[in-house]
Amino acid sequence: MTHTLHRYGKADTLNDDLVFLSMSAKGFANEKDSGEKMKKTLEIAQKHNPVNIGDMKTGNILAIPIDEIMKNVVDTSIVHAVFANVEDAAAFAKEVKEAELGISLVISAPFDHTWKVADMAGCMGHTIEYSGGIWGKTEKLPAPEVLEFTTMCGHGMISRYLVEDVIERVKAGTISAKEGSVEIGKQCCCGIYNPDRSEKLLKALAAKK
Amino acid sequence: MRIDPELCVSCGACLIYCPLGAIHINDVAEVDQEVCVECGDCLRAAVCPTDAFIYEAQPWPRSVREAFSNPLAEHKETRIPGRGTEEMKTNDVRGIYGHGIIGVGAEVGRPGVSCNFHDVETVTMALAKVGMEFAEGNPVTTNMVDRATGKINPEILDERVMSAIVEGTIPLEKLADAIRAVREAAPKIDSVFSLEFIDRPEADRSVPMEKILKEQGVAYYPNGKFNLGLGRPLVE
């Protein structure tokens, strides 16, 4: 599925949003023992300043201790790590490549960043996926500034009502932008929500009052 | 999902956590069973002070709601959690897309609107007409009764899910037809869909499908997914 695609937003905040996923191909040779390889991927991620980490089987570090996430990684897992700049993302990808784990690694980010990460990490760039945007009854969507938060979870687990509530509380000063971002990000089980970007978005919205 | 009326204290803490606004207070909190897609988000939020949420596995056909909506649920067919296949994520090992074969996907209900399978069928039937080859193992494909027409099992048509991904492949020369087909289908559904396209970049980093997307007026995002080619054995 396409859970790390379709992240909506303006270029200035998307530039700080680099999401990785790693998995094996089910029924192919690299599936065997791939859980251990995904654990290694997450170990490497922890060395390069991730802003989020998670596994679709267990949850993310905003809600669950990293040890528990690591312990539950299995061959059918899909593991994730989110970085807030190209340098950290490239350092992570380079170390994963050097580890020769043999499982797929996919980055979601602005395409000029994805090529930069590929070059810095010495990767080839195999397949590319474009989002063709949202079609149909778009009047059912929340406001664009809310979509920037909700589309950071590809499974639709970030409620627009939670986002709107958090925005109001940050504006009112009852919680900080950081606290609000963690509160929202906990709901995205697989750990692809970017709390760093979210904090910047909340601060910008609060400044508008 | 249900809420135990004996335990609920009507505090309203859970209301904002439902992505579809399915929880309301009538004396105590209640879940609108038509709107609820069994995603489990309210339960995982763990904000209920009296643990009043009741999770129950649902019988067929309502069981498709959880299968297509709860990200922690694993489809029996794909053995992966989520709503689709591995698509481009493992294309470096599978080699499904590229060299004139384009991946096309329409995730009906996304982002955060939800849909029923009447909406999904409108899209599958439109794409079937232009020769889309639906993805093996994809849960929407699995629930078709006729892949040639894109017809969905009538037993599930009224079921509501967070989203369902119509996935498949089409030759590059038919990509424009596929885009025209979804453009015609879009106003006929009572929901939205997020559209996706998969290809392989050439050695000079150009992407063959881009020309057609531009000709067809598809305003694709400047950000997207990129398989770095670390899977082994590698499909060159």
Image (tube, rainbow, N blue to C red):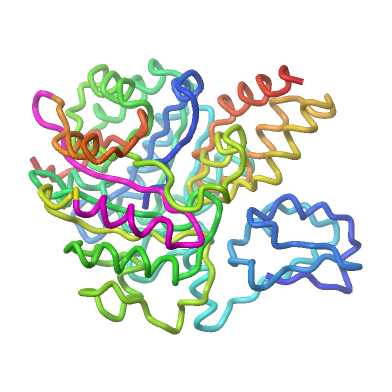
Residue A117 falls in which quadrant of the image?
top left
Work out whether residue A31 can be spotted: no
Residue A115 falls in which quadrant of the image?
top left
Q: Is residue B191 magenta?
A: yes
Residue B62: image location, x then y, percent: 54, 78
Residue B117: image location, x then y, percent: 45, 71
Indicate the quadrant containing the C terminus of chain A: top left, top right, bottom left or bottom right.
Answer: top right
Q: Is residue B55 left or right of residue A193?
A: right
Instruction: Depth check: give the residue in front, B206 or A16.
Output: B206
Residue depicted at x 87% and y 67%: B26
Instruction: Depth check: give the residue in front, B201 or A96.
Output: B201
Residue A203: image location, x then y, percent: 68, 20
Residue B39: image location, x then y, percent: 58, 62
Work out whether residue A123 can be spotted: yes
Q: Is residue A187 left or right of residue A46?
A: right
Q: Is residue B77 above or below residue A22?
A: below
Residue depicted at x 48% and y 52%: B110
What's drawn in magenta, residue-wise?
A: B177-204
Q: How many marks?
A: 0
